Image (cartoon, rainbow, N blue to C red):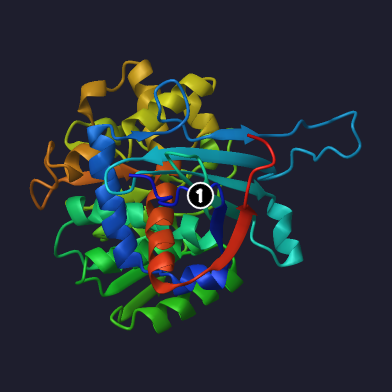
Amino acid sequence: MSEVASSSAAIDFIYLNEAQMIEAGVTDMAGCVDTMEEMFALLHEGDYRMPGANNSSHGSMITFPEDSPFPNMPKNTADRRFMAMPAYLGGKFGTAGVKWYGSNIANREKGLPRSILMFILNDTDTGAPLAFMSANLLSAYRTGAIPGVGARHLARHDSRVVGICGPGVMARTSLSAFMATCPNIDTLKVKGRGETSLTAFLEWVGKTFPQITTIETVTTDEEVVRDCDIVSFCQASPTGDVSFYPKIEREWVKPGTFFAMPAAVNFAAEFLASDIRKVFDNTGLYQAWMEEVPRPAHDIIPLAGVQWLDMVEQRKLDQASLEDLGAIVAGASPGRRNEEEIIVLSVGGMPVEDVAWGTRIYRNAIERGIGTKLNLWDQPALR
């Protein structure tokens, strides 16, 4: 059904700045996890569209050359890019949208986030804009919610100990999602490179989750993993060479561990064993990446799921052994089957997640009278 009910040619939409996004509920992690779970069921049904030939591409990105004859063209410095991530989601959502952002790691020197994001939500009948939103929080919360959906279906229900590498924004939202889905968590192990970010993260944990009564800072990846029920690596890492990525050894892992991995990782060869379950957040997303990048793809895109598909091409892994979170959420494949199995979820991030959470926030804002009304036109100059 169209979101635009009026037959008038006038088009109005709402603008939501970051404060208004918060007022409309963008930081409601429990609600975001539920919304992402509903989205995954639609992915399994196929009621969605993203870019690319298989309708599952991450988006379209502008990168820059190492050297350019044009003096005003940006240089290819760390995280220097612009990207558009469009998608359509069906079901109760029935909307389309696009997240657009620019990114530059040097922003931190100016007191800005590395990436600055905006999101446009559109009516799928007319194409008219419904909302123009500040999207840094939108993106952060939908990203963190995916590990939460995974934990709901794949972590042990009695999980108590979480290990996190990289105490940044992704760690905050992932931990928030784990807390929303695994209420027995009371212990946290965390590894960070910088004292400032680590201290800020620990202060935030103490204020936000007083039920976490044991917090341990560690210095090695092994300590992050050992004796944990849930593990998430959220650190920023350079790409281009797998040797840059944290390597996880099988001997560190206790039975029953659930890994939610939204950042660079290199799993040791022992993880190819059939007794370790390997789950994509969306199989098509990784297949699209494999069409878009050279080999080995894992050098370019540092996620676990890309490593698996490299191994499939090298005949070291059977494609049939790889699973899909949408099928698990929809009940077409089993969730956790016993307390001993080790499960790895590769988290890639998809524009359809922005559409799902953006639609919920837009509808909250309309219901609560939040946002600044803007006019596109009363009558279009061109017809």
Residue 350: tell me if it is visible: no
Residue type marked 1: Ser
Q: Is residue 313 left or right of residue 336?
A: right
Name above or below for residue 48 compared with residue 253.
above
Residue 321 drawn at (x, y percent): 21, 27
Q: Please tell me which residue is depicted at 39% across the width and 61% down the height of the picture.
A: 363
* Position of 192 relative to 116 (above/below): below
- Residue at the image point whose x is 19% and y is 50% from the top: 154
Side of 343 relative to 5 (left or right): left
Q: Is residue 101 visible?
A: yes
- The foreground one among 24 and 327 is 24
Above or below, 367 against 376 in this view is below
Residue 64 screen position, x and y as percent: 74, 34
Q: Give the quarter of the figure containing the C terminus.
A: top right
Q: Camera-side residue: 164 or 103?
A: 103
Viewer-closest of 298 and 223: 298
Which residue is at the front of the view, 250 or 373?
373
Q: Residue furthest left?
A: 338
Q: At which x and y percent is residue 208? A: 39, 79
Characterize the local packing of mark 1: few (<14), some (14-19) or many (20 or more) Cα atoms within 10 angstroms.
Answer: few
Residue under label 1:
8
Give how far across and how far down residue 82 sits, in percent.
Answer: 66, 41
Q: Who's the residue at 37% across and 58% down the image?
A: 360
Local SS, label 1:
loop
For the point 53% across and 68% down, which residue is it?
Answer: 371
Q: Using the image, determine if residue 1 lies above or below residue 232.
A: above
